[in-house]
Image (cartoon, rainbow, N blue to C red):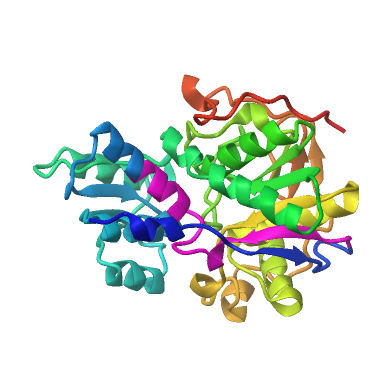
Amino acid sequence: MSTDGLLTIGCSPLAHIATPVPRDHPGYYAKIEALAVGGLKARSAVSMVMGARSRGDLADGAAIVESTSGTLGIGLAYVAQRLGHPLTLVVDRELEPAMRNLLTALGTTLVVVDRPHPTGGWQQARLDIVHEIRNGPQKPYWPNQYDNPDNARGYLGLADEIMTDLGARGIERAEVLVCSVGTGGHSNGVGRRLREMWPHLRLIGVDAVGSTIFGQPGTARMMRGLGSSLHPGNVGYELFDEVHWVGPCEAVHACRALARDGFHTGGWSTGAVALVSGWAAARWPGTVVTIFPDGPERYLHNIFDDEWCNRRGLLGPPRRSPHEIDDCHDPTDCWTRCCSVRVPVSAPAHGSASAPAGVTQPGKAAVT
């Protein structure tokens, strides 16, 4: 199979966002990854699959299996189609019917998990099935997006695009980068590359209320696509100057405001980073840049559905500023900010990921 089509991955537009969320601000820049071929996670999918092929871990025509909440599945389907790998995706019953239909149309085999793991939630339940499939007769290759360094390596090109796009606008550097955090891949790859070029860059991580990534106790999460019930090895904890946990009310408000006032909008991750990026743009001088991971299409029956949101109390007034805590382990249930990021006690030893190949270990910006 030819790899020529994979060269079209990336090259998403950079848009100036001025929507006043959570309040008026001078604007920030967002990479609109919904307009890139295969979406944001096609970048990591190409990197993980090509890395496995180059090492001999994935033979021509061999099967692939992975757990996904949706977005990575699209990227893997794109790569698997081009390279001739049968693809099985383990999803859960919360995945939207439209997304299930799309993934099936793209030629994947779906295995749907019916109930969450009692402590690890949907992620652990999906991973348990992945391990069962891997131990079956076919023994497919598992990219393991959570702990695979090739995941972060796939986003070095995104960082280079950000530098090029800003340069084309006459902007020499960014002062703040805002990234959603799920597997830790794009915050690690983009953050390290940009920090290498701009040592004083401030990196803000955006997590979901109820996620365990940065030390909070795990609870049921309404927001999909960011946050985790696990501690992914790709999270570069040492890179972050601060972390924000965002709740669903604030994310819904941001997504809807973006749609009304700025056209470019998306799902939970996009709403969460838009909220924090607007807050950062109002707080610090200089250029703020972020990544909008997805578009609105799969969220028309939840985030953009009045009845769905009303039943869950998500259309009330959102917070306009974050609650502040001194330690990431202090429990919170609303939009919250913490400037003392550290590896959670319960995280595995590999919880602070090493730099992708070709990227040095830069220092952090001063905390203010």
Q: Nearer the viewer, residue 354 or 121?
A: 354
Question: What's the residue at 61%, 42% (across, down)?
Answer: 190
Relative to residue 126, is residue 326 drawn left or right? right
Image quarter for residue 205? Answer: top right
Residue drawn at (74%, 69%) of the image? 316
32 is within the stretch colored magenta: yes
Quadrant containing the C terminus is top right
Relative to residue 14, is residue 181 depicted above or below?
A: above
Expressed as whole percent of the image width and height from the top left, the position of residue 136 reads 12, 42
Q: Can residue 330 be seen in this view?
A: no
Indicate the quadrant where residue 259 lies.
Answer: bottom right
The segment highlighted magenta reads 25-49
Label count reads 0
Question: Residue at left 80%, top 64%?
Answer: 21
Q: Can residue 327 be seen in this view?
A: yes
Question: Percent position (x, y) of residue 318?
Answer: 77, 63
Quadrant in the picture for the N terminus: bottom left
At horizontal 49% and vertical 71% (from top left) the residue drawn is 298
